[in-house]
Image (tube, rainbow, N blue to C red):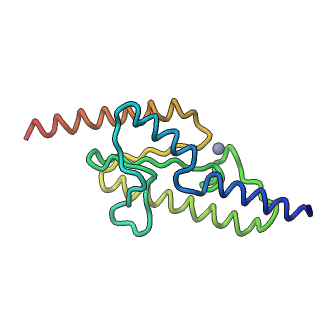
Amino acid sequence: MPLDLQATEAVRRRMQRTSRKDNPFERSIRSQLHARGLRYRIHYPIPGMKRTTCDFAFPGLKIAVFLDGCFWHGCEVHPPSVKKNTEFWLAKIERNRARDVRATAHLTELGWTVLRFWEHEQTDAIVTRIASVVETRRDRHLTALRAR
Ligand SMILES: [Zn+2]
């Protein structure tokens, strides 16, 4: 196979792995949270931002979780290696990163807690972190309700 076609094939495979909603990384995190009794909404639309969702959310507690694929979100530990249409891919990744920054800023302004994780991070550590933030928020939420 010619070299440029191989690159195209590699890009295609990577897209299949991480661009899809519901990729194995997301599913693994979600099933571990579910096993811990945590209930969330998946692909939750970000209030006030068109066509933008978080990977999942705890809307009552205003917690948004993003699980960022290393390629698509431009992880610096794993710089993208694309041999074909480099400009195109880099521009696309740059746009994704800009949108990530906007979404985080927007949600933070609305009083949400935003949790972002990279695909390369340990899933156990991610799950523990999310669970602990949920617990803290829930406690604060209950205290606020009781104080009314
Ligand atoms: Zn990475």
Q: Is residue 30 above or below residue 101?
A: above
Q: Position of residue 141 (x, y in %)?
A: 21, 39
Picture quadrant where residue 82 is located: bottom right
Looking at the image, the residue that sits furthest to the right is 2
Q: Pick out the residue farthest to the left.
A: 148
Q: Residue at x 30, y 48 (%)?
A: 62
Residue 92 picture quarter:
bottom right
Quadrant location, ligand no. 1: top right
Q: Nearer the viewer, residue 42 or 57?
A: 42
Residue located 46% across and 61% down the image = 102
Q: Nearer the viewer, residue 118 or 25?
A: 25
Please provide percent x and percent y for residue 138.
26, 36
Q: Position of residue 31 (x, y in %)?
A: 46, 38
User: Where's residue 19, x and y in %?
Assistant: 60, 57
In the picture, measured across the screen, residue 139 lies left or right of residue 58, that is left
Q: Residue at x 78, y 60 (%)?
A: 9
Callout count: 0
67 over 47 or under it: above or below: above
Position above or below: 79 against 49? above
Q: Quadrant of the C terminus?
A: top left
Q: Residue at x 35, y 37 (%)?
A: 38
Which quarter of the rendering shows the N terminus? Answer: bottom right
